Amino acid sequence: MGIIDKAADVIISGGLVAFPTETVYGLGGDGLNPSASERIYAAKGRPSDNPLILHISDISQLEPLVKEIPENAVRLYEKFWPGPLTLIFKKSAVVPYETSGGLDTVAVRFPSNAVAQRLISASKTPIAAPSANTSGRPSPTRASHVAYDLDGKIDIILDGGACDFGLESTIVDVSEDIPCLLRPGAITLEMLRDVLGKVNVDKAVTDMLEGGELPKAPGMKYTHYSPNADVIIVRGERQKIVQKINELIADTDIRLKVGVIATEENKYSYKGCEVLVAGSIKEPEKIASNLFKMLRKCDHHGIDRVFAEGLPENEIGLAIMNRLKKAAGYHIIDA
Ligand code: AMP
Ligand code: MG
């Protein structure tokens, strides 16, 4: 029996399998089995009001999970599935509330990663899979990240190498008349608007919410992606960012180990700190795919405070800055 069939048996019998997708590694269980969903929450230490995404490997699996398939959903999935896009629908009775975090809606994605597709097909059930990290930590983009967080708590880890995109899927709510972007990702707001015209953006995508405000994606209210280091974003004109970060380093208590998450272009410009190169400003997709690895590296290098160069918030930059702002608890300094 091959490893994928073994992993599918684990899913069918209510166990947990970590597997690669094109976004990040997922922690999978049978999405229609309430006790499998409960095991996922327990392994991650994830709050149970933070719903799970159901992963399918064929469009025909969508219909039984949802009350209706709106026209906007069809336009999006015809263009972007299989791929890094999650759609929110009104859920059918088939989906347990344990999986939907108590909501009457359900999140569905058809991933493009071949291992993910084979695992879902062999399991013959939609697989509920949040990112395979301990809740609050940066999402895993390599099997070793999963093992670091969850070894001993789950049954199997399928190693498919590094994830292509490295940021979680774009989430769009298509359950209401005007679609709404709840979480930015590799399918950008510009790409969504090209297909749909009008798309709203949930405030939680760009801004810190005030007391009493709730994001439409429950998970967006939690602290996220945090290394042990304090993360501080410095944004503004490219040259001013470098100058400002060097000033901030000079002002930092010398007992603290300082790091900078830098672009390739600026890597030699920082003094008296550890420089973590995320990628070239000309290739923001590379920066996106390296970001979580950089945040995890801060811990491995014992960094106490890390300054991150801010990026323009368009195209994939919107998703990168969304994750960075959460890692920084919205600690942003304008250069
Ligand atoms: P993760 O799989 O760890 O990347 O997290 C899944 C994200 O999808 C979280 O931010 C959830 O809050 C969000 N999500 C899942 N289901 C729904 C839903 N029905 N409505 C809104 N957001 C959802
Ligand atoms: Mg997650």
Image (spheres, rainbow, N blue to C red):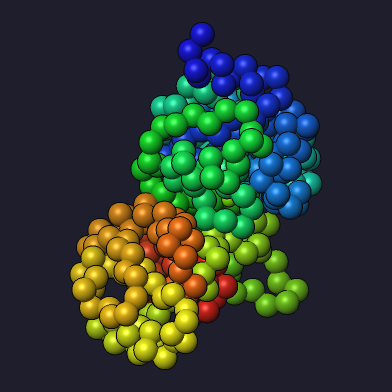
Residue nearest the observer in this picture, 318 or 328: 328
Q: Quadrant of residue 275?
A: bottom left
Q: x%, y% of residue 60?
A: 55, 24
**Relative to 260, 106 lies left or right:** right
Q: What quarter of the picture does the C terminus occupy? A: bottom left
- Choose between 181 and 96: the one closer to the eye: 96
Q: Position of residue 83 (x, y in %)?
A: 43, 39
Q: Position of residue 6 (x, y in %)?
A: 56, 16
- Asked which quadrant contains residue 9, the reply is top right
Residue pictured at 48% horizontal, 13% vertical: 2
Q: Residue 280 location, x and y as percent?
A: 24, 62
Residue 147 horizontal side relative to residue 192, left or right: right
Q: Is residue 193 something one can see in this rendering?
A: no
For the image shown, how many numbered marks are present on the structure? 0
Residue at 53% across, 63% down: 227
Q: Which sits in the foreground, 113 or 217?
A: 113
Q: Is residue 105 above or below residue 214?
A: above
238 to 95, vertically: above or below: below
Residue located 54% across and 60% down the image: 225
Residue at the far front: name it.
255
> Is 231 above or below relative to 111?
below
Q: Is residue 99 above or below residue 279?
A: above
Residue 277 in view of the camera: yes
Residue at x-position 34% and y-position 75% = 273
Furthest residue toward top: 1
